[in-house]
Amino acid sequence: MNGAAYRAYAGQQVAEARRTIGAHGIDAYTGICRSCGRPGPCDEQRAARTRLVHYLEPAEELHADRPP
């Protein structure tokens, strides 16, 4: 997979993870996931957060040598 294809794939994964995190928000009062009704953070939100971190970290490392 070349760099452009990976960036496109990573962008899709990040967007999907952000949608999942938004959909599985936790009610501050009860601590229950608003989408699935399980105690939060639910498995879907945990998996989405893991995926988000996985695909965001390499992008930051690739551009670490560039000046701001």
Image: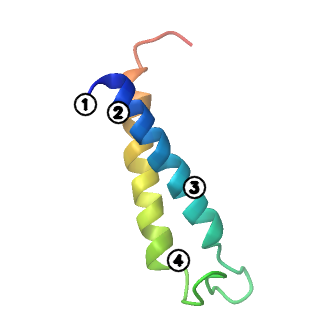
Q: Residue at x 25, y 30 (%)?
A: 1
Badge 1 is on which residue? 1
Are circles 2 and 1 on residues that touch, CB within 8 Å? yes
Badge 3 is on which residue? 18
Are circles 4 and 2 on residues that touch, CB within 8 Å? no
Q: Check disc 2 and report its element: helix, strand or loop.
A: helix
Pick the front one: 44 or 6: 6
Is 54 placed above or below 49 here? above
Q: Amino acid at mark 2?
A: Tyr
Q: Amino acid at mark 1?
A: Met
Q: Residue at x 65, y 77 (%)?
A: 26
Q: Earlier in the sequence, mark 3 or mark 1?
A: 1
Which one is in front in this view, the residue at disc 4 or the one at disc 1? 1
Q: Residue at x 46, y 51 (%)?
A: 52
Badge 2 is on which residue? 6
Q: Check disc 1 and report its element: helix, strand or loop.
A: loop
Q: Amino acid at mark 4?
A: Pro
Q: CA distance from mark 4 to mark 1?
A: 33 Å
Badge 4 is on which residue? 41
56 left or right of 34?
left
Q: CA distance from mark 3 to mark 4?
A: 14 Å
68 left or right of 50?
right
Q: Check disc 3 and report its element: helix, strand or loop.
A: helix
Q: Amino acid at mark 3?
A: Arg
Q: Earlier in the sequence, mark 2 or mark 1?
A: 1
Q: CA distance from mark 2 to mark 3?
A: 18 Å
